[in-house]
Amino acid sequence: MVNHSGVVPEWMSERKIGWAGAIPFVLIHLLAFGVIWTGFTWPSVIVGVVLYFVRMWGVTAGYHRYFAHRTFETSRVFQFILAFIAMSSAQRGALWWAAHHRRHHKYSDLEGDLHSPVRDGFWFSHMGWIFVKGAEETDFDRVKDLQKFPELVWLDKYFLVPPTIVGVACAFGGVEMLFVGFFLSTVLVWHVTFFINSLTHVWGKRRFETTDDSRNNFLLALLTLGEGWHNNHHRHQASTRNGFYWWEVDLTYYVLKLLSFVGIVWNLRPVPEKVLAEGRAADAERKAGRKPAPVEERGRLPKGALDVPA
Ligand SMILES: [Zn+2]
Ligand SMILES: [Zn+2]
């Protein structure tokens, strides 16, 4: 790839795949298939379903809406718990995840975006990008606001601790619990999370004419607990909710709202009335068969995330 924009670091434009890094990823997939031999017990299915929902919630409320976008506030203790729950899905550290995601918003579907299905196709944006040599590093310049918490930096370094604890706990429940409850549910959380990168920029409807190709997709919103409203999110990434209107189901937001009633999280950022009105106008335009006016504004990233070197 030609590095013409001046914002793409060398490792990213080279895109050399580190095959050794893919070995654990492949192994976990093979272990998920182990259920064919172990079979399942009903408790193992229940644990698998619970771990799917809890960890998917951790990915969306923790990695995404808290660490990457800082759309609400919480205590230092619950912040750590959020990082732990998210990281138990084995998607590396919260700082690593947030740094990559902030880059995605800054360069969405442009050359500096490491996972754009529009530019690089389905498989690369779904999971190929994870194995690019250099992508395993945490870009601390993008997460200066999070770097000031030593416990998060520690957890980012020892990112295997949370999934190992959950995996070992499952193993105590028996072999079915380990394979169905942990390995299979982990792989499901992975691919549904990856759908946000691979599918929500190609499959679904656009409401806002954002500068990227993001879409809204009801089915993906159900599977991902609200992240399927990705076009809304690209229009206004600073709000806690991704489903902007009552019919846009956003389970992550509902749980955060409940947690705010008991004081565990607070200052959930609303969708500004101006953006809601703009959305209603855009829906009306599309209904009339016209394309709404383009949205040039890329939305606000948290302090410390913008204008950092590529
Ligand atoms: Zn985002
Ligand atoms: Zn996106």
Image (cartoon, rainbow, N blue to C red):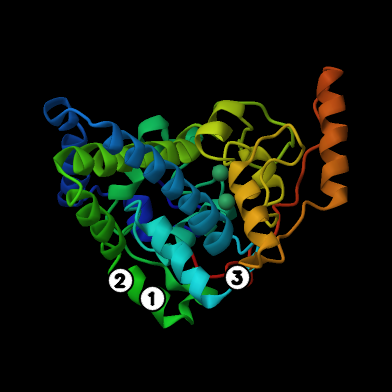
Circles 1 and 2: CB atoms closer than 8 Å: yes
Res. 46 mark: none
Q: Amino acid at mark 2?
A: Lys
Q: Label 1, on which residue?
A: 153
Residue type (three-letter) at the residue carrying disc 3? Thr
Residue 134 at what x, y percent from top left?
30, 59
| Left or right, 297 with reference to 273 | left
> Residue at 73% of width from left, 36% of height from top?
209
Quadrant hosting residue 227: top right
Pair 1/3: label in front: 3
Q: Residues within 10 Å of mark 1 (few under 14, many from 20)?
A: some
Q: What residue does disc 2 label?
A: 157
In the current view of this chain or complex, which residue is farthest to the left? 37
Q: CA distance from mark 3 to mark 2?
A: 23 Å
Left or right of 161 in this view: 171: left
Check the picture and name the quadrant holding the N terminus.
top left
Q: Which residue occupies the foreground of this view, 75 or 92?
A: 75
Which residue: 82% across, 28% down? 283
Q: Quadrant of residue 225?
A: top right
Q: How many angstroms separate mark 1 from mark 2 (CA)?
A: 6 Å
Q: Position of residue 194 (x, y in %)?
A: 42, 40
CA–CA distance in space, label 1 to label 3 = 18 Å
Instruction: Name the kind of residue labelled 1 in the image.
Output: Val
**Occupied quadrant, residue 262:** bottom right
Q: Identify whether 36 is placed above or below 110.
A: above
Residue 216 position within the rendered picture, expressed as x and y whole percent measured from the top left:
64, 32
Q: Secondary structure at mark 3?
A: strand
Q: Give the numbered dot on residue 74.
A: 3
Work out whether mark 3 precedes mark 2 in sequence or the reverse, and give the earlier one.
3
Q: Position of residue 73 (x, y in %)?
A: 64, 69
